[in-house]
Amino acid sequence: MTADMSVLSLLWDASIPVQVVMLLLVGASLMSWSIIFTKRRLIRRTKDASDEFEAAFWSGGDLNTLYRSATRAKGGSIGMASIFESGFREFNRALQADGTSNDKLIEECRRAMHVAQMREVDRLEQSLATLATIGSTSPYVGLFGTVWGIMGAFMGLANVQSATLAVVAPPIAEALIATAMGLFAAIPAVIAYNRYADKVVRLEYRYDGFMEEFSSILQRHARAKKGA
């Protein structure tokens, strides 16, 4: 009699612990792909919005007009626009306060922009840790299922008079599927984590550079208005 070696048959005939491992890996893989697609859209949207805002900012337009456009943005400002909005709002508030020195004014604007930057970076980094966890643990979870399946295969040989390849192959094959599923869940998660983490770091560098340049612009505006 020829054993049925189809993948579905092997999964169905696997032991309960191995099936549980496979279900966990399928769930981890689905979660991973969901995070990958969601994070891809978010990072692309943030980058495009930052590019658009940066082009408008350096076009030489009026800062008040740019601020009103940022506050009226549908769904709220994101990325660099959010940092600009927080900094310029604090600038206008501190400028109206009596006795505020230029250094203190710029320090308060920097603090407001830094808080906005942390909020933006946290939004971009959300769920990246989950991708890293899936990428680092899935192979070991799959390996556990493989080891358990192979142990069951060898224990089953104790009740067999003669061990043949037809007897040993199905349980070992079903055990190795767990390793394959672990790698299938881990590899995309690791690739996506490294790629998205690099994109987030690059955006963070852009935010840092913008904050420095915008702080210098605000300092010049503060001196001009107080001098007038």
Image (tube, rainbow, N blue to C red):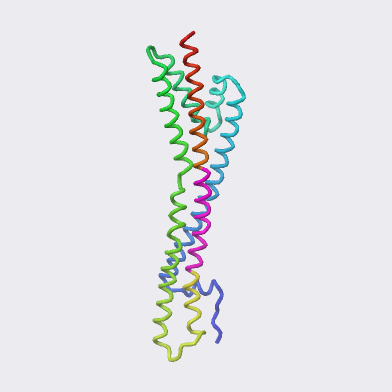
Is residue 194 shown in magenta? yes
Residue 155: horizontal and vertical position, in percent? 39, 81
What secondary structure predominates along the stretch shown in magenta? helix
Residue 8: horizontal and vertical position, in percent? 54, 71
Residue 119: horizontal and vertical position, in percent? 44, 36
Question: Where on the picture, by quarter, is residue 122?
Answer: top left
Q: Magenta residues, as a range?
A: 178-199
Q: How many marks?
A: 0
**Residue occupying image coordinates x 50% and y 17%:** 221
49 vs 102, nearest the viewer? 102
Q: Quadrant of the N terminus?
A: bottom right
Looking at this view, name the residue that lies furthest to the left: 99
**Residue occupying image coordinates x 45% and y 66%:** 142
Residue 97 sits above or below residue 195 on the image: above
Residue 165 sits above or below residue 72 on the image: below
Is residue 188 shown in magenta? yes
Residue 38: horizontal and vertical position, in percent? 53, 47
Residue 11 sits above or below residue 60 on the image: below
Looking at this view, name the residue that lies furthest to the top: 228
128 vs 149, nearest the viewer? 128
93 vs 28, nearest the viewer? 93
**Residue occupying image coordinates x 54% and y 22%:** 68
